[in-house]
Image (cartoon, rainbow, N blue to C red):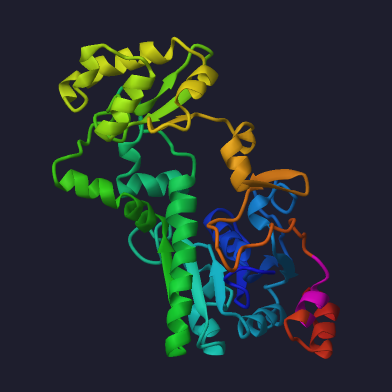
Amino acid sequence: MPGPLQGVKVIEMVGIGPCPFAAMMLADMGAEVLRIERKSAPGEGNPYPTLGTKYDVMARGRRTLALDLKQAAGREALLQLAAQADVLLEGFRPGVMERLGLGPDILLGRNPGMVMGRVTGWGQYGPLAYAAGHDINYVALSGMLHAMGRKDGPPAPPLNLVGDFGGGGMLLAFGVLCAVLEARQSGQGQVVDAAMTDGAALLGSMVYGLRAHEMWSDRREANLLDGGAPFYDTYACSDGKFVAIGAIEPQFYSQLLVLAGVDDPAFEKQWRESRWPELKEKFAALFATRTRDEWCSLLEGSDACFAPVLDMAEAPRHPHNAARGTFVEVDGVTQPAPAPRFSRTPAAVPEAVVPAEDGAAILADWGLGRAAIEALREGQVI
């Protein structure tokens, strides 16, 4: 498979959320990623019925091996695989890998140059490290959840984009690649502790800076980027669909007013915050006079910083997304394409999800001998 990570070998301990997302990103870029699923309890406790099917988009582009890690032979097989890997990814609670006899001391003892990437909600240590949680909890602790939502309502959950994927999976992928680059210089691997609380806080770096400079209020919908500014918000159109406006700079704001045919002098006071509530009402009335498509015909492609708010059925069909190939279809499932783009080593079109297959074939491809594989088969480890 082409891509800038061709030749990098990764083991992924199958889980949910940020760990498979990071593994997908690495596989998209050409890394050889082998998913390890527990043979004794595949899918145990899984609330996500798409896992293991073609709809499990985050499992694309890699093979899956089911190993019985309760048996010593299964753990030894994993250690033999890890001895050949550049990276091992896991997203269990702290201590789970250690209880399996697969903690960092054991893994790095077998392969001193390997990077062990560990992603959790609270981190590997701290007062909350061993508590259960999900994306919304980790984002709440970072201070970022409090900043999202309308002033007359509670904080709004940002799907699981900020914790699981931005602050978790992407942080994990970035961390392990940093460690791989360092290991190629030093010959020594290390453990990467990627915590979603840390990552969600890191995503808020600019906002924390603005707050320290007294340019951000703790009140929701009172700031430049949280819907407080009339020129940075979403508005309903006459057909009930929405548009998004982001005309922050004066020249872009002026373009918006000109193209929208606005001649009301009240709109000239762009940065007078005391007038923002009034201007929001005026913008709401303005955008309600046309359908979303009519506003697209008038504003899209201009410097008015405009876009239609598309649903997930519309987004893949938008001409810009279609021209860039932002979405692809794999095994009949429309999904986001690998990103970012590379000029010399582009990623391939993702391969379909491959369910757990004949373990013997995978183990042979990873260099285990015939006798060892037959022993694992006879012991029902694979």
Indicate the position of residue 224 as horizontal and vertical percent values. Answer: 26, 34
Magenta stretch encompasses residue 123? no
Residue situated in front as seen by the camera: 90 or 236: 236
**Chief secondary structure of the magenta portion:** helix
Q: Is residue 238 above or below residue 102?
A: above
Residue 231 shows in this picture: no
Say above or below: 296 vs 161.
above
Which residue does the image show at 25% across and 11% down from the upper left? 264
Give residue 255's quadrant in the image. Answer: top left
Q: Position of residue 348 (x, y in %)?
A: 67, 61
The percent coordinates of residue 291 (x first, y second) are 51, 15
Write the start and end of the magenta stretch as one range: 357-364
Q: Nearer the viewer, residue 255 or 350?
A: 255
| Residue 50 makes an appearance in the image | yes
Instruction: Pick the residue in front: 94 or 368.
Output: 368
Identify which residue is drawn at 17% across, 40% down: 215
- Quadrant where the C terminus is found in the figure: bottom right
- The residue lying at 30 percent from left, 18 percent from top is 280
Question: From the image, which quarter does the N terminus lie in?
Answer: bottom right
Q: In this view, does 318 lie above or below 267?
A: below
Relative to 138, 210 lies left or right:
left
**Which residue is drawn at the image coordinates 47% and 33% (left, top)?**
301
Is 360 in the magenta?
A: yes
Residue 246 relative to residue 266: left or right? right
> Which residue extends farthest left?
214
